[in-house]
Image: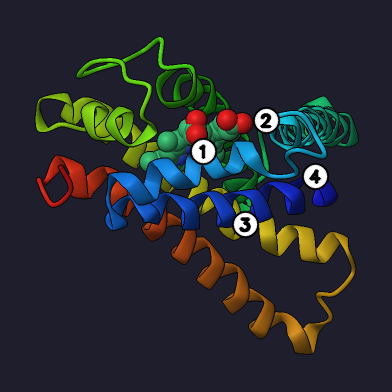
Amino acid sequence: MATSGAILVLYLIAHMYGNLKVFAGQEAFDGYAHGLREIGYPLLPESGFLWVFRIVLLASILIHIYSAVALWARARRARPASQRYQVKKRVHRTYASYTMRWGGVLIALFVIFHILHLTVNVISPGGASDSPYERLVNGFQPQFWFVTLFYVAAVIAVGFHLRHGIWSGLATLGVNQARRQPVLNSIATVIALVVTVGFLLPPLAVTFGLVS
Ligand code: HEM
């Protein structure tokens, strides 16, 4: 869970940073998207690196989901059925596992929608386009406020997921000794906040007419 999660966190930071290129204009954003397909070329075929990267990403997502389901089942087995609905003392822990599980399901559904929307572009509010910049700008126009709202909800879910996931992952990797906890807690919060705000900026900027 922690290792696949770490790969996904690194991907999200890079993806969020790349998305901010939308503020540099169409040429910069489309050039960046094109550049991703050229990495390793001509040593690798065109988009070769991107496909290796996609396979690693997909494997990480599947391992992450598999581990989550396995841990969920293990946690259920560890508690006798008679006590299953009587966990009152550890409200915080129950709250965290609840948001992680259902937040995770929402994020997985969002990723499927998001790929169909901005990568494959078969869902194309505002019109399909070969230009990643145009796909983004078309899709978040004010009349598609509900698309923006869905993205905002999903990105906030990603933020909560990261906040707890980074903290929990660091514990799994054994670096959460008591004296380090305040620092690790701050690191998890700062990374989650930066990723959330960074992801929210492009869709909101388009919806509010700052990017067109
Ligand atoms: C809310 C702000 C976001 C924007 C504006 C955005 C934008 C984009 C765009 C334009 C693409 C297509 C890139 C291309 O075809 O060149 C893309 C792909 C993708 N995004 Fe996002 N994204 C956002 C948030 C997220 C989040 C929160 C996640 C994950 C939880 C995510 C996961 C992905 C994945 C997995 C792909 C497919 C990558 C590939 O082509 O292999 N994105 N995104």
Q: Do tag 1 and tag 2 residues touch (Cβ < 8 Å)?
A: no
Q: Earlier in the sequence, mark 1 or mark 4?
A: 4
- 145 left or right of 101? left
- Counting residues from the N terminus, which is met first, the one under dot 1 or under dot 3? 1
Residue at image x 68%, y 60%?
166
Asked if the residue at label 1 sits under 8 Å from ligand 1, the reply is: no
Please tell me which residue is depicted at 30% across the width and 15% down the height of the picture: 128
Instruction: Say which of marks 4 and 2 sits in front.
Output: 2
What kind of residue is marked 2? Ser
Comes first in the chain, label 4 or label 2: 4
The residue sitting at 48% across, 47% down in the picture is: 32
Q: Which residue is mark 3?
A: 164
Which corner quadrant holds the N terminus? top right
Asked whether the viewer can see residue 89, the reply is no
Instruction: Please identify the quarter of the rendering in which residue 108 is found.
Output: top right
Q: Give the spatial CA distance, label 2 vs label 3.
A: 34 Å
CA–CA distance in space, label 3 to label 4: 15 Å
- The correct choice, above or below, for 30 with respect to 13 in the image is above
Q: Secondary structure at mark 4?
A: helix
Residue 54 lies, in percent from the top left, at 71, 31
- 10 Å crowding of disc 4: few (<14), some (14-19), many (20+): some
Q: Nearer the viewer, mark 1 or mark 4?
A: 1
Q: Earlier in the sequence, mark 3 or mark 4?
A: 4
Tag 1: residue type? His
Pointer 4: what residue?
4
Q: Is residue 136 visible?
A: yes
Q: Which residue is mark 1?
A: 34
Residue occupied by mark 2: 47
